[in-house]
Amino acid sequence: MTSHDLRDQLASLTTEAFRPELAEIDRLPTLDIARLMNGEDAGVPAAVATQLPRIAAAVDAVAARMSRGGRLVYAGAGTAGRLGVLDASECPPTFNTDPERVVGLIAGGPAAMVTSVEGAEDSEELARRDLDALKLTPDDTVVGVSASGRTPYAVGAVEHARALGALTIGLACNEGSVLAAAAEHGIEVVTGPELITGSTRLKAGTAQKLVLNMLSTITMIRLGKTYGNLMVDVRASNDKLRARSHRIVSLATGASDTDIEKALTQTGGEVKHAILALLAGVDGPTAGRLLQESGGHLRTALTHAAR
């Protein structure tokens, strides 16, 4: 593609559109600019809402595969890639997932998290190499993320993953995107032109963050990683999370501090096991066995324990 072709393509994208009414934004008082930005951001949830049925269908497909041992892989460049890496990195402490179960790939590798890696986003071959290193299976899911919906790295990742039989999702912020068309599940959250022309780290980035939050969080709910709205699979890796673990057990069981500490000690600090031990009146090993037999679903384990 020539530079002229690329300019024409970018000019056709809603996310790249120029807004003449904001041409003198730099002359406005700071508070007025802040109000403008805040007003722009207010429309993002409504744009996401139009895609909720597609998001829900994608989540159900992801959860079905992850329940069989599959992985969730995000692939993107620049802001989109960083958001994928962020979402993936937050799953282990929040849901006690193996770091290899939710993976974030960014064009250019880890260095691209903090600095621009020139040309990386334009390489479909780089996307294929990054995915091949993961040895994809049909139980895996690859989510290509790109505000424009045309980034070669994201599109290449989805096309390669689909050819290998993996589930594919394309998340873009323009209608009729190549990325959404290439995926089994296309999600297009159209947030419109940005306050700063073409700066898709703004509304488009916010929309992508919201959707990625939904994909991972609701998938984890479907996998039994929560009990109600409690993070019962939280990994207590620091003092704050240990205090949170105690509070979660308290909220779930209403037990005394002494009994909670005893249960957490007997279950090696595993919140879900401690809750089951307290609510079902079983010891730590029995709680572990019941949860294993229930696929990690606490409500199912409680039902089995009551029989």
Image (cartoon, rainbow, N blue to C red):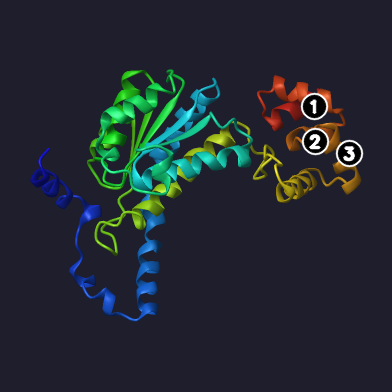
Q: What's the amino acid at mark 1?
A: Ala
Q: Secondary structure at mark 2?
A: helix
Q: Which mark is residue 262?
A: 3
Q: Position of residue 165 (x, y in %)?
A: 37, 18
Q: Which residue has dot 2 on it?
A: 274
Q: What's the amino acid at mark 3?
A: Lys
Q: Nearer the viewer, residue 134 or 63?
A: 134
Q: Are marks 1 and 2 in contact (CB under 8 Å)?
A: yes
Residue 293, relative to residue 86: is it above or below? above
From the viewer's perspective, tell me whether residue 238 is left or right of residue 174. right
Q: What quarter of the picture does the C terminus occupy?
A: top right
Q: Residue furthest right?
A: 258
The residue lying at 81 percent from left, 43 percent from top is: 253
Q: Earlier in the sequence, mark 2 or mark 3?
A: 3
How far apart in space, not on screen, are marks 2 and 3 (Cα)? 9 Å
Q: Earlier in the sequence, mark 3 or mark 1?
A: 3
How far apart in space, not on screen, are marks 1 and 2 (Cα)? 8 Å
Q: Residue furthest bottom?
A: 29
Q: Which residue has dot 1 on it?
A: 287
Q: Is residue 52 visible?
A: no
How far apart in space, not on screen, are marks 3 and 1 (Cα)? 14 Å
Q: Position of residue 31 (x, y in %)?
A: 40, 78
Q: Using the rendered view, name the quadrant where residue 217 is placed.
A: top right
Q: Position of residue 16 (x, y in %)?
A: 22, 55
Q: Secondary structure at mark 1?
A: helix
Q: Nearer the viewer, residue 97 or 304?
A: 97
From the viewer's perspective, tell me whether residue 289 is left or right of residue 233. right
Q: Which mark is residue 48?
A: none
The residue lying at 15 percent from left, 52 percent from top is: 11
Q: Using the rendered view, name the quadrant where residue 293 is placed.
A: top right
